[in-house]
Image (cartoon, rainbow, N blue to C red):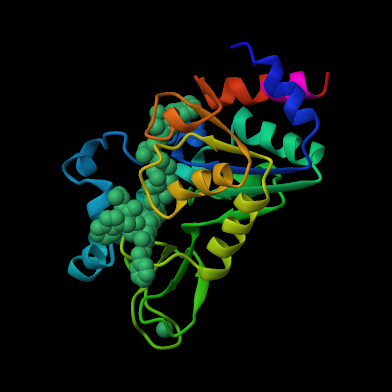
Amino acid sequence: MKIPIELINYLKKTTHIAVLTGAGISAESGLKTFRDAQDGHWAKYRPEDLATPEAFTRDPKLVWDWYAMRRNKVTEATPNAGHFALVELESLIPNFTLITQNVDGYHRQAGSKNVLELHGNIQKVKCYDGCGVVESWNTGDTPPHCPKCNAYLRPDVVWFGESLPLDTITAAHKAALEAQAFFSIGTSGLVEPAASLAHTARQNGAIVIEINLDPTPLTPHVDFALHGKSGEILPQLVKELIK
Ligand code: BV8
Ligand code: ZN
């Protein structure tokens, strides 16, 4: 994929970049994206129906087992060339913010520093009754109980209908406002409030670049639509940037 030279020339002059990633950036690590069809026992469930407080209240073990399965796949796989290219891009840009919808923790694992995990992290669990206990995932009962108040522990992720951590979404919004270039990478752009960040950046003068396998609702609004695999496009973009 040839990266447009006008994009490279623009990026060489930028000091503020914000990046939003979604499940697509982890696809080449072998992880299913959020809307990929699920297989086996999970084929009959839609992720949107399992990633909700109602689902956990209704059947804590079912939801816990779904996250345990996903966490095992995350632990078995590793970040890919797309994650590592973003680590290198961060080292080239004075003000760089990596905003992710993913819960796999791969950006930090690859070495990215300024990471905002909008939807939490699958390697952490917290007390379902909100007594404040947050721990790393433990493989005890399914689900385990809070050591402090004995309520269930739940994955420390943001479910549908739940608010995002205020400090995280505030920081993400600020990064979008200040960005001279905003990348939307590997996301179908369907989930709010993450999906609005690209529009916030654009309305405040940023150019918007989409790197995604398929067109999305954002595509008509971007300055550069690079359709293909992020694990191939991002290393190519960084290579051209450091030339
Ligand atoms: C909120 C964590 C309000 C859990 C996730 C009705 C009822 C209730 C809520 C709503 C409603 N209508 C709208 C809402 C708001 C709702 C929402 O946006 N719903 C959508 C579905 C319509 N949002 C919320 O509920 C949010 N909270 O609004 O709170 C509120 C306010 C005040 C007070 C109280 C409440 C919370 C949203 C967070 C939900 N949690 N994840 C978990 O992971 O289990 S979201 C989930 O979707 C994942 O995090 C995922 O990252 C995210 C977005 O999906 P994508 O990352 O985009 O993945 P997807 O599979 O869709 O796309 C992948 C893309 O990659 C594809 O386009 C593909 O082409 C591309 N791709 C594939 N391979 C590659 C590639 N690209 C490049 N290279 C490749 N190799
Ligand atoms: Zn508790």
Q: Image check: 110 left or right of 120?
A: right
Asked if 177 appears above or below 237 in the picture, the reply is: below
- Residue 201 is situated, as x and y percent measured from the top left of the image, at 58, 46
At a point 50% along the width and 41% down the height, the residue shown is: 76
Q: Please state the horizontal and vertical placement of residue 179, each as a whole percent of the image.
A: 67, 46
Q: Residue at x 58, y 69 (%)?
A: 167
| Residue 159 visible to the viewer | no
| Residue in front for this viewpoint, 170 or 114 | 170
Dominant secondary structure (helix, strand or loop) of the stretch shown in magenta: helix
Provide the residue span drawn in magenta. 237-241
Work out whether residue 142 or residue 160 is closer to the camera in this orientation and state it.
Answer: 160
Q: Is residue 65 part of the magenta span, yes or no?
A: no
Residue 239 part of the magenta-drawn span: yes
Q: Nearer the viewer, residue 146 or 205?
A: 205
User: Which residue is farthest top?
Assistant: 2
83 displayed left or right of 52: right
Q: Residue at x 55, y 56 (%)?
A: 117
